[in-house]
Amino acid sequence: MNTVKRFLFWPLFFTCQLVALALVSWHLLAQFHFAYPAGYQLLDLDKHIAEFAPLNRYKDDFEYTTPEDHWRLFGEISDAVQASGKGLGEISYPLKNGQTTALMHEAEIIHLQDVANLIDVFYVAGTLCLLVWIALIAFAYQQKLTMPPAKKILLGFLVGFAVIGAIVFIIGPTAVFYWLHVQVFPDGHQWFFYYQDSLMTTLMKAPDIFAFIATLLLSLLTALWCASLYGINHWLKPPSYQPSKTSRKKRKP
């Protein structure tokens, strides 16, 4: 049983916990559009948009839009990819003459639909991991299992992240970034856009906004992970021995 716990139960437990809490973190931040207005200020996106919007080869007048327009547009993109891509083609911005036009051209919409499909898969995987994790918590409670020491848990995760970080560093972050995109997106679908070709990319100052979002996700995930570890460990920990009143009375002074 000790071997099963060490090499099967707890690794599965912590893997499901990590994926499930990653989904919870993503879903919570998505409700606030990943704090885009804060990232907008931090990354000086207004200056970035003012510089590259006039250079766009497909769309006009985006340089005349306001920060409020930008926040709304990013929010609509965020909501659409969370809703399996529904409404991507309807996202629009006002032109200088007061009319409106679609924010994105076909290749951008196809790419964001691919992103939406990927998010759908993430929700399915995360939900399954959440259910399995809850079942494992119940099993651990029923079997009166105690969690490994916190130092071992932290060491295991630190070693895992260190190995992944070393691999990324050796191969190269850019090469890994491109490889992942090639693997997850369908062949023939464009996923790299120059600022001059995409208001979507200009609006996000990609990839800078992704680093900002990743920092938020990692921070929230870490907080939820630590809180859940503390709570579950406290719940599974057997009650400490408390001498009865009778036994205390029998003690000699």
Image (spheres, rainbow, N blue to C red):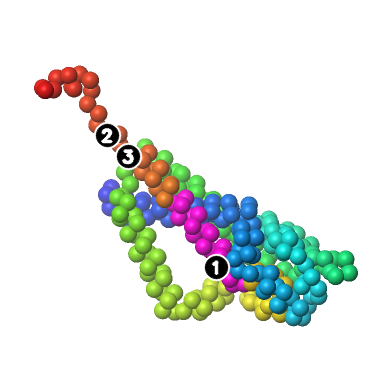
Q: Is residue 178 visible?
A: yes
Residue under the image location 45 percent in, 55 percent down? 222
> x, y (%) of residue 251?
13, 22
Q: Secondary structure at mark 3?
A: loop
Please say if the residues under marks 1 and 2 sit with CB atoms less than 8 Å apart: no
Residue 212 located left or right of residue 98? left
Residue under the image location 77 percent in, 67 percent down? 65
Residue under the image location 61 percent in, 63 percent down? 39
| Magenta highlight on residue 143 | no
Name the residue tied to disc 1.
211
Three-letter residue code for mark 1: Ala
Q: Is residue 117 visible?
A: no
Residue 7's quadrant in the figure? bottom left
Residue 138's quadrant in the figure? top left
Please say if the residues under marks 3 and 2 sit with CB atoms less than 8 Å apart: no
Quarter the C terminus occupies: top left
Three-letter residue code for mark 3: Lys
Three-letter residue code for mark 2: Ser
C-alpha span from label 1 to label 3: 38 Å
> x, y (%) of residue 230?
39, 45
Residue 203, relative to residue 153: is it above or below? below
C-alpha span from label 3 to label 2: 9 Å
Name the residue tied to disc 3.
237
Closer to us: 237 or 13: 237
| Residue stretch in magenta | 206-225
| Image mark for residue 240 | 2
> x, y (%) of residue 252?
10, 22
All told, the count of numbered labels is 3
